Image: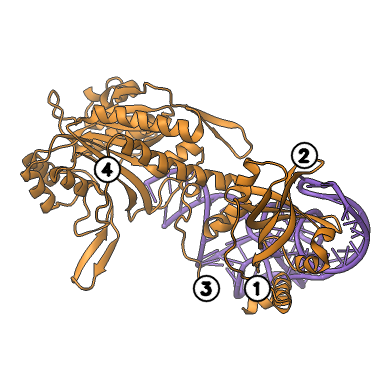
RNA sequence: GGGUUGGUAGCUCAAUGGUAGAGCAGCGCCCUUUUAAGGCGUUGGUUGAGGGUUCGAGUCCCUCCCAACCCA
């Protein structure tokens, strides 16, 4: 409060607030019926219509006895024309107490100005909410990344391109749900607080339930619960919600992120690959209107173009490795290590063979793959929850979908042999291991149908489809270190 | 955790170690079809925080905080 009274801009707005109250106007008004949102009226514009709309004042062009303002919300903007003759001196005195940022309801008739702008000629206005702080620069918007992320509302108000990205993300999620429901998948909700954080190998967030006196973990994946539902008789299920991983924060990682997992009884990883291919193309067409996605830099130059045209490439994991180092699988561990050091792929001494190979894959295949690529038959150590290949038990029947240099989606033929599943979970090796969920193994013993399963990182999918380079740009409120003293 | 870059007015940005500036916003005046409206005038700063060097620090040095990017 002290800080506020020191700032002239805030003090002036508070003076106007008081003046509104003195004039008998409630600066924080009540419900206001409209005939449409600003953007909708503009999009379906017709002249000489009586309309009521409401929005935030985002621009003010003062011509003396007449004024133009823009009213905006997430639907867009609509210009309103106000003049002293129509509104009267009393109303104009109230109007003088308004600022950019205030919420205003207006009633009037639509017309087109002589410059061709669809407008509403106001016959009355209603103060809906006073803004006590000035908005960011009307032309440049918010550029400071810290403000964009910490005060996302300011980013949404002043940067239309940010609003557009989030509208697209929302549409992507909606279209995925629609797509799956159209194909008979049922959306379910499974625990986010789990006694054993299973289904993936990642550090969990720990919490405590007081009444039960037990530690619980925020889920790192819903997989083991969705498979219990396959046991329970659901044959097509999905869950589209948050996972939590207590790991690093980066351009590609947020501690909480959105994941789609879907399971289809009696299907396999190849059928799931088909499904994902169809789904991503459906989403791209409905949300972006194209299968050609351009990623541009801040100057508007195209950095890369992603072509989602079907069919997508499917290639064996080992063939991709051989594409990089033809005699990779004929080499000894030490020879592989030596190759990595020569080629600037970081390896450590505690890493096992499959991990070294995986590093080569990530650096020299994954990061360089822009167009969709299904990488099939990965080493079994990487995927303990998938069925082993009958012809080659060292690999599993899975795909890993790579687009835009990132893993977007894994798909498995799900392992449903309880004994093999126990063994695979108990004999995991390497850096990452999963905990044993005994009840999950019990469920498998009751019998789980063969099934295909997929996961899709929704944030990364949204990044790919909207052309942004940071996961923070597709998450409304990305995690930041709390600011001390505030 | 390590490295690089940055933090200056409400916002967007300037400023060889030598009086902290501009545009927008704000405030005042003019203007009844503008749209980054225009014209004239004008207010606004503990330069992220704290130390140090110096006659003098936004600028150089140290510590810390926050952020972005790269690496682990």
Check whether the beta carbons of the residues at disc 1 and disc 3 lie within 8 A of each other. no
User: Which shade is chain B?
Assistant: purple
Give residue A26's mark. Answer: 1
Give whichever of discs 1 and 2 has the lower sequence position.
Answer: 1
Residue under label 3, please give it.
Answer: A485
Check whether the beta carbons of the residues at disc 3 and disc 4 lie within 8 A of each other. no
Number of residues whose C-alpha sits closer than 10 Å to that of mark 2, classed few (under 14), some (14–19) or many (20 or more): few
Q: Is residue B72 left or right of residue A190?
A: right
Give whichever of discs 1 and 3 has the lower sequence position.
Answer: 1
**Foreground: A62 or A366?**
A62
Q: In this view, does B38 lie to the left or right of A133?
A: right
Residue beneath the point at 28% across and 54% down: A203
- Res A274 → quadrant: top left
Residue under label 4, please give it.
Answer: A186
Residue under label 2, please give it.
Answer: A116
Distance between the alpha carbons at the discs numbered 1 and 3: 33 Å
Number of residues whose C-alpha sits closer than 10 Å to that of mark 3, classed few (under 14), some (14–19) or many (20 or more): few
Q: Which one is closest to the eye, mark 3 or mark 2?
A: 2
Distance between the alpha carbons at the discs numbered 1 and 2: 35 Å
| Helix, strand or loop under label 1 | loop
């Amino acid at each position: 409060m002290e800080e506020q009274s020191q700032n002239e801009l805030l003090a002036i707005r508070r003076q106007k607030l008081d003046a509104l109250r003195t004039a008998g106007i409630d600066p924080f008004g009540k419900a206001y019926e409209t005939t449409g949102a600003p953007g909708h009226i503009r999009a379906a514009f017709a002249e000489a219509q009586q309309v009521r709309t409401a929005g935030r004042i985002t621009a003010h062009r003062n011509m003396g006895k007449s004024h133009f303002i823009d009213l905006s919300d997430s639907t867009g903007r609509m210009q309103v024309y106000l003049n002293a003759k129509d509104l009267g001196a009393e109303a104009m005195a109230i109007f003088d107490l308004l600022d950019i940022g205030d919420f205003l309801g207006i009633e009037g008739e639509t017309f087109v100005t002589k410059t061709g702008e669809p407008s509403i000629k106001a016959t009355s206005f209603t103060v809906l909410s006073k803004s006590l702080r000035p908005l960011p620069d009307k032309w440049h918007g918010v550029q400071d990344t810290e403000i964009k992320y910490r005060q996302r509302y300011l980013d949404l108000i002043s940067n239309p391109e940010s609003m557009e990205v989030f509208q697209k993300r929302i549409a992507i999620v909606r279209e995925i749900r629609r797509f799956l429901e159209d194909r008979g998948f049922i959306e379910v909700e499974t625990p986010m607080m789990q006694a054993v954080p299973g289904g993936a190998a990642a550090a969990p967030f720990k919490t405590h339930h007081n009444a039960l006196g037990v530690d619980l973990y925020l889920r790192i994946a819903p997989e083991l619960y969705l498979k219990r539902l396959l046991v329970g008789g659901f044959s097509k299920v999905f869950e589209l919600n948050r996972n939590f991983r207590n790991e690093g924060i980066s351009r590609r990682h947020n501690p909480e992120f959105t994941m789609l997992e879907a399971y289809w009884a009696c299907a396999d990883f190849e059928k799931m690959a088909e499904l994902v291919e169809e789904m991503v193309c459906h989403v791209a067409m409905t949300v972006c209107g194209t299968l050609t996605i351009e990623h541009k830099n801040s100057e508007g130059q195209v950095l890369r173009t992603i072509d989602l045209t079907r069919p997508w490439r499917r290639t064996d994991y080992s063939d991709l490795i051989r594409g990089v180092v033809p005699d990779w699988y004929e080499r000894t561990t030490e020879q592989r290590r030596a190759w990595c050091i020569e080629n600037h792929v970081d390896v450590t001494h505690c890493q096992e063979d499959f991990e070294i190979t995986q590093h080569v894959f990530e650096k020299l295949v994954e990061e360089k793959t822009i167009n969709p690529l299904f990488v099939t038959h990965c080493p079994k150590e990487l995927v303990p929850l998938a069925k082993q290949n009958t012809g080659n038990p060292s690999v599993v029947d899975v795909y890993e979908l790579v687009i835009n240099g990132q893993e977007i989606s894994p798909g498995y033929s799900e392992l449903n042999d309880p004994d093999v599943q126990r063994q695979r979970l108990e004999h995991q090796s390497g850096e990452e291991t999963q905990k044993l969920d005994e009840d999950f193994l019990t469920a498998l013993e009751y019998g789980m149908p063969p099934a295909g399963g997929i996961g899709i990182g929704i944030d990364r999918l949204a990044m790919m489809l909207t052309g942004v380079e940071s996961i923070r740009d597709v998450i409304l409120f990305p995690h930041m270190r709390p600011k001390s003293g505030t």
